[in-house]
């Protein structure tokens, strides 16, 4: 296919994939400088998963009690189980304070202290109340405010466009190709800079807090372009997912004082993290919870425990945690004012992702060689700020702060460079994917393959891992990839062809899931969210290093040359809470 055959060809300085906090914040930065910025998003912008974030956004404002940038830095490093790059953490905590005040000046309706300052609540792993919040709908108000600001500054929106291929050759990005979900047809976006802000990928699991759109398209596109992914084995399980649904009950509940109890009515965290109790980091609490369940102390011996808010009282629950109250009531008919709510760990956050440097430029190897014009921010990226385990409320801050930083560097790059040439056949890869599905034998369907993947990932790649389970999972993924080749899509329609979209997303899930399992199999230690019952100790002598993984000739190839950046004052130590 030639360029002329594409439905549309767009030439825009900065093309941003993703309309979550990271994408919108970057777009705003570019647009404010006067350059053209376009946001391409497969969901309508305000439906991005960022809008579902509840609990808060971290910054050491010290509005409620003493706090410092150093404390925020140390908590983040300790929370990461020492895998975070400390130069990135330092940059992050310094910028985080500005990011919150900028949001305030844009009009974000933060909850306030009695004397009018931005209120802050405690969150797991943070040594001071640091989470700025708006009730329990913090992501919602941040996302809507940013979207309005983007409209005000004339950001172009291509909503309901699904990116199907990246245009990268000789380590230079020249744009991307996207499918118009509403009307059908491929569009070429020719850009000087591309930002991948495609969010997380919890949808590879059955029990997950993530939105349906979180299928890891961005990370899969990067793999397909021959570039590496970093630290993919680290996936966070949040301890308070609604039983069976996985829908999140924010850590804000525990921040406000909620308990977690087992079948005996015990606050069992006293046996695992006596100093921090329910406000230990998520990896610690999820493991404790899963241990209680595995040892028969789940409620009625079953696979869940309780989140207990009753002692907080009706007024606090309804004023501070209204969404949590509604979710429990609507999905489990549990009135959290009167009864405890059944919960279980839920696949929640991806620490790993697309490797990038402190300027958010995507890198292609351990030496840090930059792919020119290609940037990444937010949950899809791995800078690495969160290392092996992220602290709650550091993620929206990560997306917004590094989104802004990405926007600034993209602007600078656009000013200094001309448009790179497109590949000679820019549409080939994207068109090939669609043609394959439309001409597929149809002996297989995408839905059952996806279900098998998700069920098995929940079963074999959960809070606890071991070699046998992971080898089994790897075999299942290979088999499902093989079956995927026979998937056919009957619907040839152009408008809202969700059959086609979901089949395309499944290819991505099957692609990066393999990297997660391979990375986890190779890493013979336990660190942060990656816990192996066959290697239960952290092993700094052999494993204090990042994983980079490529797909080469159909195989996953790994390299460990990317060292962790560690400052003299924050040397690894045993992690106790
Ligand atoms: C339920 C829940 C609650 C959370 N609560 C908190 C919290 O209280 N505090 C906190 O700090 N963090 C929280 N997090 C984590 C945090 O919300 C996310 O990590 C962060 O918002 C991610 O932002 P993002 O911009 O990277 O991606 P997202 O907001 O996920 O946006 C991704 C964007 O990429 C687009 N996209 C993806 N693939 C394609 C494609 N192929 N083509 C076109 N567009 C594409 C989507 O349309 C979407 O616009 C929570 C997460 C969840 C799931």
Image (spheres, rainbow, N blue to C red):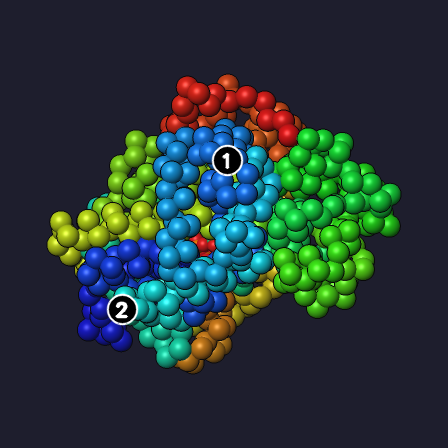
Q: In which quarter of the image is residue 555?
A: top left
Percent position of residue 213, x then y: 49, 62
In the picture, measured across the screen, residue 177 lies left or right of residue 524, that is: left
Looking at marks 1 and 2 on the same chain, the residue that comes earlier in the sequence is marked by: 1
Which quadrant of the view contains residue 79? Answer: top right
> Tag 2, which secondary structure?
loop
Does residue 66 appear to the left or right of 275 in the view shown? Answer: left
**Residue nearest the viewer, comparing 508 with 264:** 264
- Residue 400, x across and y down, in percent: 40, 51
Q: Residue at x 22, y 63 (%)?
A: 36
User: What residue sits right under mark 2 in the picture?
Assistant: 154
Residue at 46% over, 42% down? 61
Quadrant position of residue 315? bottom right
Q: In which quarter of the image is the C terminus?
A: top right
Answer whether residue 482 is visible to the viewer in this image. Answer: no
Residue 276: % across, % down? 66, 34
Q: Say what secondary structure mark 1 lies in.
A: loop
| Residue at the disc numbered 1 | 67
How far apart in space, not on screen, are marks 1 and 2 (Cα)? 38 Å
The residue under the point 64% across, 58% down is 321
Residue 241 shows which numbered tag?
none
Is residue 256 shown left or right of residue 450? right
In this rendering, the label closer to the viewer, 1 or 2: 1
Residue at 78% in and 54% down: 310
370 or 288: nearer the eye? 288
Q: How would you rate the neighbour count of disc 1 (Cα within 10 Å): few for under 14, some for 14-19, many for 20 or more?
A: some
């Amino acid at each position: 296919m030639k360029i002329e055959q594409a439905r549309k060809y767009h030439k825009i300085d900065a093309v941003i994939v993703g309309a979550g906090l990271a994408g919108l914040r970057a777009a705003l930065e570019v647009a404010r400088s006067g350059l053209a910025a376009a946001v391409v998003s497969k969901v309508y912008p305000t439906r991005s998963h960022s809008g579902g974030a509840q609990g808060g956004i971290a910054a050491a404002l010290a509005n409620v009690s003493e706090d410092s940038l150093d404390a925020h830095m140390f908590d983040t490093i300790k929370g990461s189980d020492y895998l975070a790059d400390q130069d990135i953490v330092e940059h992050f905590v310094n910028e985080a304070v500005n990011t919150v005040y900028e949001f305030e000046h844009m009009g974000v309706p933060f909850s306030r202290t009695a004397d009018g300052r931005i209120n802050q609540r405690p969150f797991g792993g943070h040594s001071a109340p640091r989470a700025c919040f708006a009730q329990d709908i913090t992501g919602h108000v941040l996302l809507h405010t940013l979207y309005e600001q983007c409209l005000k500054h004339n950001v172009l929106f291509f909503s309901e466009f699904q990116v199907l291929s990246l245009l990268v050759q000789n380590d230079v990005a020249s744009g991307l190709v996207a499918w118009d979900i509403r009307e059908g047809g491929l569009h070429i976006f020719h850009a000087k800079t591309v930002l991948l802000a495609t969010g997380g990928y919890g949808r590879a699991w059955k029990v997950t807090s993530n939105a349906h759109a979180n299928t890891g398209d961005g990370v899969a596109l990067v793999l397909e372009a021959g570039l590496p992914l970093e630290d993919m084995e680290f996936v966070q399980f949040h301890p308070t997912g609604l039983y069976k649904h996985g829908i999140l009950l924010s850590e804000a509940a525990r921040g406000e004082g909620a308990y977690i109890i087992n079948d005996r009515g015990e606050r069992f965290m006293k046996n695992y993290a006596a100093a921090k109790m329910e406000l230990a980091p998520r990896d610690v609490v999820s493991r404790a919870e899963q241990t209680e369940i595995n040892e028969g102390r789940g409620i009625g011996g079953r696979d869940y425990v309780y989140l207990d808010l009753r002692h907080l009282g009706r007024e606090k629950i309804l004023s501070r945690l209204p969404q949590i109250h509604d979710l429990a009531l609507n999905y489990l008919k549990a009135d959290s004012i009167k009864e405890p709510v059944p919960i279980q760990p839920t696949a929640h956050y991806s620490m790993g992702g697309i490797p990038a440097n402190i300027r958010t430029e995507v890198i292609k190897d351990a030496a840090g060689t930059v792919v020119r014009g290609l940037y990444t921010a937010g949950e899809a990226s791995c800078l690495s700020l969160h290392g092996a385990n992220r602290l709650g409320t550091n993620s929206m801050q990560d997306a917004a702060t590094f989104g802004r930083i990405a926007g600034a560097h993209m602007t600078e790059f656009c000013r200094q460079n001309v448009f790179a040439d497109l590949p000679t056949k820019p549409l080939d890869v994207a068109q090939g994917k669609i043609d394959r599905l439309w001409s597929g034998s149809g002996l297989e369907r995408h839905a059952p393959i996806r279900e098998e993947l998700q069920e098995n990932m929940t079963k074999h790649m959960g809070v606890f891992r071991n070699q046998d389970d992971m080898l089994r999972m790897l075999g299942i993924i290979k088999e499902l990839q093989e079956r995927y080749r026979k998937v056919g899509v009957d619907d040839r329609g152009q408008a809202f062809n969700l059959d086609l979209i979901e089949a395309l997303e499944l290819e991505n899930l099957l692609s990066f899931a393999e990297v997660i399992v391979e990375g986890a199999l190779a890493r013979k230690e336990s660190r942060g969210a990656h816990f192996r019952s066959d290697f239960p100790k952290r092993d700094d002598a052999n494993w204090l290093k990042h994983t980079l993984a490529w797909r080469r000739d159909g195989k996953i190839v790994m390299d460990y040359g990317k060292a962790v950046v560690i400052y003299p004052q924050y040397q690894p130590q045993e992690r106790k809470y």
